[in-house]
Image (spheres, rainbow, N blue to C red):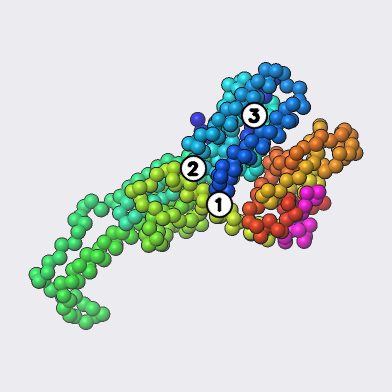
Amino acid sequence: MGFEDKINKLLEFKSDKYPITSLYLKLGPKERENFRYKIASKNLIKEQREKINERNFTSDALKSIESDIKKITAYFDNPDNLTGFKGIALFSSTGEGVWEVFKLPFVYRNRLVVDWSPLVRQLVTINDEFGDIVVVGIDRKKARLFRISLNGAEEILGYFYPDKATRNTKFQAQEGKFRQRVSLGGVGGEVAQGFGEYGFQRMIENEMHQHFKHVSERLFEYHKQNKFDWLIIGGIEQVIADFSNHLHRYLKEKCLGTVTIEINLIKPDGLLEKALDLLELTERRNEKKLIKKFEQRLVSGLAANGLEATLKALTMGQVRILLVAEGFIHSGFICPESRVLVLEKSDNLCPEGKTPIPVVDIVDEAIEEALGQGAEIQVILDEEAKKEIDGIGAILRFKL
């Protein structure tokens, strides 16, 4: 079952007897160090158990939830389940027989929620943002194409230069048997037999560039029929440089980066990991550009900085891009009916005039609200960039 099919299956989940447990967990290098992700998941479970005790779940529902937690814990205890990706989403409702695992390129924030419907907004947004990546592994004689999506990595094309098999691939010198008469710069003269080897090498070079041209054309044709969002070129440094000269301008603009690989040893799972690393580097570069844009918009009133201003912008539906400094958390409150996010426990802050309910981390709720409004989420990891926002901020669609 494909990624989108699995999401649609979750969206169809309905139960008035058994709730569903939704977990998102970051699994980048930092989280994997000393198994920090296990500590993070245990803390999320502890927090959720405290909330569960305050809700009026039936004994059957509680048994189902407890089974969900045990299954999730057991899943994380097996390292073989956690290779080749940087985030994961798990959905479990034991009572309804639901168990879905999504291996993801990233996760915005760690989150664990037990409710009557699955928390799928991050999944939908990641599906929209990730896009498809094509990797072309190339050497002087052949090429292999792979496509990477949220469904995994698979090989889609492989070919040799068409004329490669029609000639002897080793130059046979004919020492002492001939001298060639050629014109050099318009002046006749004799060149020693070594010119034959030189000519052969020129033929090899020409065939190599014809091969690169052929691969480039096939790649562009493939793109026209099967659109993709990013391109990665793999091979040795000189081959990558030579092949790039033949690449169509449109595809050059889609180039995410290059990787050093041996074409005969390529494994799809290994490519997926390399692609995620390149995507992360691109994200870090984009962060700095985004922060500069944020600073400029702040001056003109088209940005909000800090928790209070950002929550107000969310309430007004102004947020286009939500910026969150990694690690920033803050307690707060949510209005029971309107779901408006506020920082104080005051009845007059909720449109419905009711007392807001405390939440452990209002930043998580802000992300969910922004996703629900169709806003883009950008978690800021760069330490210098993080200094430019007061924990959370937003680039706005409009100003009031």
Q: Which residue is mark 1?
A: 280
Q: Nearer the viewer, residue 248 or 349?
A: 349
Q: Residue at x 56, y 45 (%)?
A: 34
User: Is 71 one of the magenta-colored residues?
Assistant: no
Question: With 39 as the anchor, is 148 left or right in this view?
Answer: left
Q: Residue shown at 30%/54% (left/top)?
A: 141
Q: Determine the residue located farthest toward the bottom in the rendered image.
A: 187
Secondary element type, mark 2: loop
Q: Main SS type for the magenta part? A: helix
Q: Give the mark, 1 or 3, whose residue is nearer the N terminus.
A: 3
Residue 49 vertical position relative to residue 240 in the rendered view, above or below: above
Q: Which residue is mark 2?
A: 84
Q: Is residue 164 left or right of residue 252?
A: left
Residue position marked by numbered label 3 in the rendering? 21
Provide residue 33's location: percent of width, then percent of height: 55, 46
Query: Spatial distance from mark 3 to mark 2, Cα to Cα?
Result: 24 Å
The residue segment tinted magenta is: 295-309
Graded by Cα atoms within 10 Å as few (under 14), some (14 to 19) or many (20 or more), the crowding at tag 1 reads some
* Along the line of sight, the residue nearer the viewer: 110 or 342: 110
Image location of residue 43, percent across then percent down: 66, 37
Viewer-closest of 342 and 188: 342
Q: CA distance from mark 1 to mark 3?
A: 29 Å
Inspect the image, locate mark 2, and give the three-letter code of the amino acid beneath it.
Gly
Residue type, label 3: Thr
Quarter of image, res 185: bottom left
